[in-house]
Image (tube, rainbow, N blue to C red):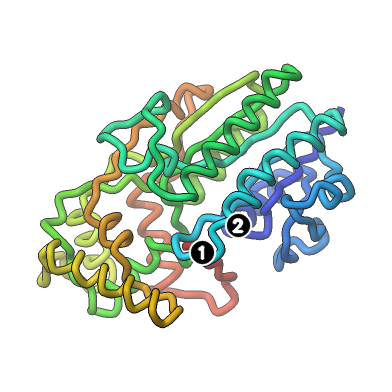
Amino acid sequence: MTQKITIIGGSGFLGTNLCRQLSLNAQEFEIIDLKMSREFSENCKIGDIRDKESLRKTIKGNVIVNLAAVHKDDIRDRSEYQRTNVIGAKNLAMICSEKGIKHIIFTSSVAVYGFAKIGTGESGDINPFNDYGRTKFEAEEILRQWQRDDGNALTIIRPTVIFGEGNRGNVFNLFNWIASGKFLMVGNGQNKKSMAYVGNVVAFLERCIANKQHYALYNYVDTPDLTMNELVSFVQKNLKGQEYIRFRLPFAIAISLGYLADLVSLLTGTSLSLSAIRVKKFVSSTEFSSAKSELGGFEPPFKLLEGVERTLQSEFISPSPNQEIFYTE
């Protein structure tokens, strides 16, 4: 049977990068998304994972890559996590069973571990601290039941924060603050951050599509992890020609400002770039281990710092006016 890939949420940042690679490899694919893909409009159909009938009408492939998710920290309607991440997974499992589709690749998140112990691997304790992590794990459980019931093939990938060209998430925000000269290091900067460059995540997704394992679960992390001091110094060297971090803000002051921003946001109904959870995320260490090399000896095509350098080049040093922008966090 000819393989056709259905990418749900394929108009977004990760989906568009995956579709570029599939297109280069002449792999047949379709996109189902709430919005039309700017780059692959001829492959795109408007559909909604929250609506069973929408999926029933639009899905024509025989391998599903589910990238659809609600993931922002500041979503006002908290029930949207449940509708998209959990009800969406139920709908997808049902329609796949109806259509005889036997292979799903699902992008979950390391957020299912919450503030995890250093070196947490795929068998780590599940302890999400927000609705995003909670509903991602609930979606995993629904798809695991689908896999067990019908003997299907399921691969679950739990990426850490994904960055890259065109992404307007937390990593870009950090780089942008450094570029502007307004960056303040919070704390001592010794905490490490697991990161994932989009080009490497795409390569791993391609490997998962080709590898029809009965069941597999992988964290995705590009190693070695960098301390915040190392990351910020590298970015400053590339953008400013100097590595020294001049300004630091004690954590106690930063977290107080974060709680104050939360109060202002609550009272005014506005979304601010500063919040207590973002301060906590910044100073916490997120160091995960990954069994990704067990998937056929997978080796990422880009080194982590190479991915950072490519992103800085594209976003700040030689930006393209035609680059598509994706807001993810």
Say which amino acid is labelled 2: Glu
Q: Give residue 41's quadrant in the image.
A: bottom right
Q: Give residue 139's quadrant in the image.
A: top right
Q: Residue at x 39, y 66 (%)?
A: 172
Say which amino acid is labelled 1: Ile
Q: Residue at x 77, y 27 (%)?
A: 102
In terms of sequence position, does the residue under pointer 2 or pointer 1 come before the other?
1
- Foreground residue, 38 or 96? 96
Q: Which mark is residue 80?
A: 2
User: Is residue 243 shown to the viewer in this render?
Assistant: yes
Residue 148 in the image, given as x and y percentages of width and height:
67, 18
Q: Are marks 2 and 1 in contact (CB under 8 Å)?
A: yes
Q: Is residue 155 left or right of residue 269?
A: right
Q: Residue furthest right?
A: 57
User: Is residue 165 shown to the viewer in this render?
Assistant: no
Q: Residue at x 20, y 54 (%)?
A: 230
Task: Return the residue at label 1.
Answer: 75
Q: Residue furthest bottom?
A: 268
Residue 299 in the image, given as x and y percentages of width and height:
45, 33
Q: Residue at x 63, y 43 (%)?
A: 86
Residue 243 in the image, given as x and y percentages of width and height:
15, 65
